[in-house]
Image (tube, helix red, strand yellow):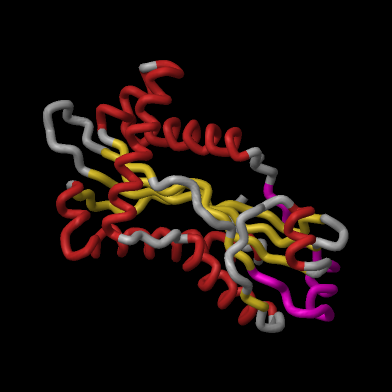
Amino acid sequence: MRTIETRVRVILLTVGIFLLLSGCALSPPRQLAAEDLARIRQEPPITVVVYQPPPPFHQSTRFQNAMGIMGGPVGYLVGYSQTTAAGAQTRGMLKLVDPSIRVRDQFVAGITSEFGLPQPTMRDYIDSHDIERLRAALGPGVVLEFKTLNWEIFSETANPVAQDLFGFTYMGRARLIRLGEQKILWESMCGIVPVPRDKATVHELQQNDGALLKRWLIEAADKCAKELIAKFSARSKP
């Protein structure tokens, strides 16, 4: 339990620094109003975009986790730099794909089927989450936007002399925006999704072209999409 609590603190700190550096802010969840849903059904199809590039993929060892918690700001920044470099190497070597792309596909399939919405218009990836810039690029319609907030593998090994065994977490966000009015109609995040229960060494994650790690990314994306669909449908637990 202590390891999980430590990881939660590190992940939240990581996301907080990323948002600070990128100029983003986490807004409180917004539930879609019935009148907005009814209006969307009568309008041109929703445009769907994925924010790219995603934040850095991180790979953190037990030592770097401890450095981030106990080393103060300097220790955190040193550890952050190291986990960013290690994550970039692993992502490049295995050609890891941002999970928000699969979250988009699963979410869109779910809501179009459930709510009878017209098939959305899928656009190329977009490099800005700023509403004014989105409007300039896409026009005044309704856009559904997906964004990865955090993705990383991290050591969950508590034994200080044991080999690092890694798990994977993912955080994502979705927003439904009426660009003409610059109004966010719905916004929610999938929570910190721990995947999976089994852990693996870096060597095991790199075997078979990263098959195990890629399976974890798919599982996380599917869990995230399911959670977002439930929140969009107002079926999630309070």
Residue 211: horizontal and vertical position, in percent?
24, 64
Residue 204: horizontal and vertical position, in percent?
16, 54
Residue 74: horizontal and vertical position, in percent?
42, 18
Magenta residues, start to end: 29-48
Left or right placement of residue 16 versus residue 211 in this view = right
Residue 38 located within the stretch drawn in magenta: yes
Left or right placement of residue 161 versus residue 215 in this view = left
Q: Vertically, is 190 above or below 76?
A: below
**Rendering quarter of residue 159:** top left
Viewer-closest of 54 and 197: 54
| Picture residue at 27% right of the left edge, 39% below the top | 155
**Rendering quarter of residue 221:** bottom left
Q: Vertically, is 91 above or below 39?
A: above
Viewer-closest of 74 and 172: 74
**Rendering quarter of residue 20:** top right
Residue 34 located within the stretch drawn in magenta: yes
| Picture residue at 25% right of the left edge, 27% below the top | 63
Residue 129: horizontal and vertical position, in percent?
67, 52
For the N terminus, give its image quadrant.
top left
Viewer-closest of 58 and 154: 58
Left or right placement of residue 133 versus residue 193 in this view = right
Q: Vertically, is 119 above or below 18?
A: below
